[in-house]
Amino acid sequence: MKYPMLGARFCKWFEDEYKSVWAEWYGSDIPESMLKDLNMNSNEYFNKFIMPYLSLTKEQLIATLDILATRLKDKLTPQPSPFCLSYKLTINPKINALDWLLVHVADLKYFEFNDFVKSKYEKPYKQCLVCGKPDFYEITNPMGQKIQKEFSHKKKYCHLFECAEDDPNPQEHAQGCHYKEWAYVKKSMNQKLSRCLERIKKYKSKKNDNIFESEIFDKKIKEVEQEFYQIFEKFYLEQYKKNCKILYTVRSSEDDDVFDLRKF
């Protein structure tokens, strides 16, 4: 592993973010101010207001929510009101984005995951590592014909017709190729992190018995160490944001289903 020192901070951030998103999505993060107003604890609130819905079948739930929407219209809008209320069930893209973030971080081979993060990680099976597209993708040749390309444990990226698919040099791949996109992300970050460690090594080698000079170099070392961590933090926060646009869930085996978030 290239940079094991980055692991602890990332794993701590991931666990905190995962639990926060999970609590928000499943409604377990109930505002304390609301509980105080209702004079309830979280269990009492959940049992009174949430559990009745969870005990219904899908058809019963749809009918109940329709009735609730009608009552909310009367309560929340001026009467008589020409407006109707509607509801829409969606999947929180942050959960899927976090799943894919582990895929991307694992592919960097920087450090080992701790037990919590390891329990959430799934290695994609026959999917593009950048966009999540499952099974295959299509390219169009100069004649306008569509060609189907299958994913495998070795072929893990969507390419374009102009790409030399098996060439590891990203310059041999066309703009818009997902292999090229990911290769440049990794290359740029590796260069930045490596340069930071080289600077730290240089400052450490210059330290001597002069207390004043040693203090100066200690300060420089701390500044570069902070820069080192910030480079990786910037990467995974930006990647997390980009991953919210991935339309497919991670599939770990042939038996797993891939869900298209556009259908929810």
Image (tube, helix red, strand yellow):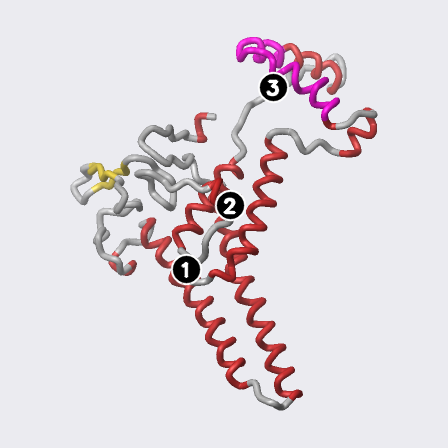
| In-front residue for pair 81/158 | 158
Judging depth in this view, the residue of 81 and 141 nearest the camera is 141
The first of marks 2 and 3 along the sequence is 3
Q: How much space separates mark 1 and mark 3, taking CA atoms?
A: 51 Å
Q: Secondary structure at mark 3?
A: loop
Q: How many marks are shown on the rendered structure?
A: 3
Residue beneath disc 2: 115
Label 1 and label 2: CA atoms lie apart by: 17 Å
Q: Are marks 1 and 2 in contact (CB under 8 Å)?
A: no
The three-letter code of the residue at mark 2 reads Asp
Label 3 is placed on what type of residue?
Ser
- Which marked residue is nearer to the observer: mark 2 or mark 3? 2
Residue plotted at (41% across, 40% down): 122
Q: List the residue tagged with mark 3.
A: 86
Q: Is residue 65 left or right of residue 157?
A: right
Q: Residue at x 21, y 53 (%)?
A: 166
Quadrant into which the N terminus falls: bottom left
- Outermost bottom residue: 210
Q: Amino acid at mark 1?
A: Met
What is the magenta segment's predominant secondary structure? helix
Q: Residue 183's x, y, as percent?
A: 35, 56
Element type at mark 2: helix
Q: Residue at x 48, y 46 (%)?
A: 242
Specify the farthest residue to the front.
115
Query: In this rendering, would 198 be left or right of 9?
Result: left
Region in magenta: 43-66
